[in-house]
Amino acid sequence: MNQAIGVIDSGVGGLTVAHELMRQLPGESLIYLGDTLRCPYGPRSEAEVKRFTWEMVNFLLPKDIKMLVIACNTATAFTLTELQEQLPIPVIGVIKPGARAAIKYTTNGHVGVIGTEGTIRSEAYATALKHIKADVRVNSLACPLFVPMVEQGVLSGERADHIVAQSLKPLKEQNHIDTLILGCTHYPLIIDTIQKTIGDQVTVISSSEETARETSTILEFHNQLQTGVATPTHQFYTTGDIGIFVKITEGIFKASADQFQSVSIKRAII
Amino acid sequence: MNQAIGVIDSGVGGLTVAHELMRQLPGESLIYLGDTLRCPYGPRSEAEVKRFTWEMVNFLLPKDIKMLVIACNTATAFTLTELQEQLPIPVIGVIKPGARAAIKYTTNGHVGVIGTEGTIRSEAYATALKHIKADVRVNSLACPLFVPMVEQGVLSGERADHIVAQSLKPLKEQNHIDTLILGCTHYPLIIDTIQKTIGDQVTVISSSEETARETSTILEFHNQLQTGVATPTHQFYTTGDIGIFVKITEGIFKASADQFQSVSIKRAII
């Protein structure tokens, strides 16, 4: 199977998923599409998110992808079931992998979830968690400042510490959870600050890492893992300003310059 | 889907997988079959392992299981592909989940694997690891004393410390690996001693935990997770002495008396 894995996101957050896919599946090629032009999806209506997501899917399908990863929480919440039913290839989203990992790690059965207002309001994580383990207790908290902070490139330092500390205060004061799901693909970029703030006694789960892990599981289960030693090629598309997208991508991939060399970034009209 | 998950093992080692399945999928019912009478499978020929495994499968299939977990490394190495091709239900083994988790956790790309002589000789883990990441370095080590030790109920204390220290000496002296796969379902029962011996700088991976995690992934992907609030029922069968099996099962489930109450144990003639 020399086909690529397709990855879609409302913008740049899904790059953390792409980065993990490249790390955990180093033989696989990716085609990424970020709808930066219309980001964020969080505050949009369900109908609009569905329409935009289908437009992204229709851009990637002719490129002969073998699997689709919805690397956006909002798009996952609104379109996963529909896409799984209607596409001829396996489709996974970012919500269930994070939920499943939390069930594996929690020992006191008390799980925290942080995300955008849209994701928290949708209760998608609480639903996914309780679907697996009916008696799990879930404390959800919207952190509306994190995405704008990350998009501005503020990933550490005093300002980041302050915003994260203020935002997580309610969860920290309750002091109940032993596991915290990062329910937004932007948040792995500030995972160190979040871990420091919430404390070492809490296991922090990156839905990006977990989604990459499950992509590997599903691909192998369908006998579709890349075999042989062909060098993968990665194509990244953005609907928005290519300069900003390149800058953010460089930032995310800064620790793996080799990988970044193999990435080509283009403007997409969808 | 009110059907149970079927779990087969050469004996009692697979109970660690069953225990994790009950923890990570608390709504699911299990039907477990341990071929204690003919344990261990490790030193047997491929033909014999295949025949015994099919006998176990044919015992479970009429019980209308919705998925099969091969909770034995030797049986996985010899029969997984065949069973996946021939059974009408999803089938997973214990090797790939452990390999995949190791790829996720390693940062230096140097992974250790310990298992029975048969499993190490088969190179099943090295093959699975390199299938995902061609340049991973693998140090394998057979630990033939661990299974007899566990079967005798020696799980901690001076004797266990000594046997584990002596067995792991070659791996510890090389000091290369940052991740260690427990490539035998007996080993999670002595994970604390293994972690203490190999050191905190090494991430120790239980293939039992990881297999339960992937069972959850595959079931949900196939839309076959148990829904509703029905209390699960668990049936455990052994081909051997029921007294010894009950004793070991009680030992494994000691920390979760509630779960053990819901387990019925019977003798199986296959």
Image (cartoon, coloured by chain):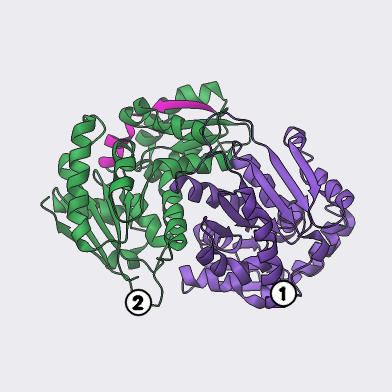
Chain colours: A purple, B green
Taking the view exactly as shown, the residue that stands out farthest to the left is B269
Give residue B244's position: percent from left, percent from top.
Answer: 18, 49
Q: Closer to the camera: disc 2 or disc 1?
A: 1
Identified by mark 1, the residue type is Glu
Give the residue at x 61% y 60%: A94
Closer to the camera, B72 or A111?
B72
Give residue B225's position: percent from left, percent from top.
Answer: 41, 66
Taking the view exactly as shown, the residue that stands out farthest to the front is A62
Callout 1: residue from which chain?
A
Give the quadrant of residue A23.
Answer: top right
Please tell me whether residue B160 is drawn above or below residue B32 in the rendered image: above
Residue topped by disc 2: B230
What distance separates the C-alpha of mark 2 from that of mark 1? Answer: 38 Å
Residue A173 is a magenta residue: no
Give residue A249's position: percent from left, percent from top.
Answer: 80, 47
Please tell me whether residue A150 is drawn above or below residue A128 in the rendered image: above
Residue B39 visible in the picture: no
Q: Specify few, some or many for label 2: CA neighbours under 10 Å numbering under 14, 14-19, or 20 or more.
A: few
Give the residue at x 65% y 41%: A22
Give the quadrant of residue B199.
Answer: top right
As drawn, is A58 to the left or to the right of A266?
Answer: left
Q: What is the total number of numbered labels drawn onto the structure image?
A: 2
Residue B146 is a magenta residue: yes
Stretch in magenta: B137-151
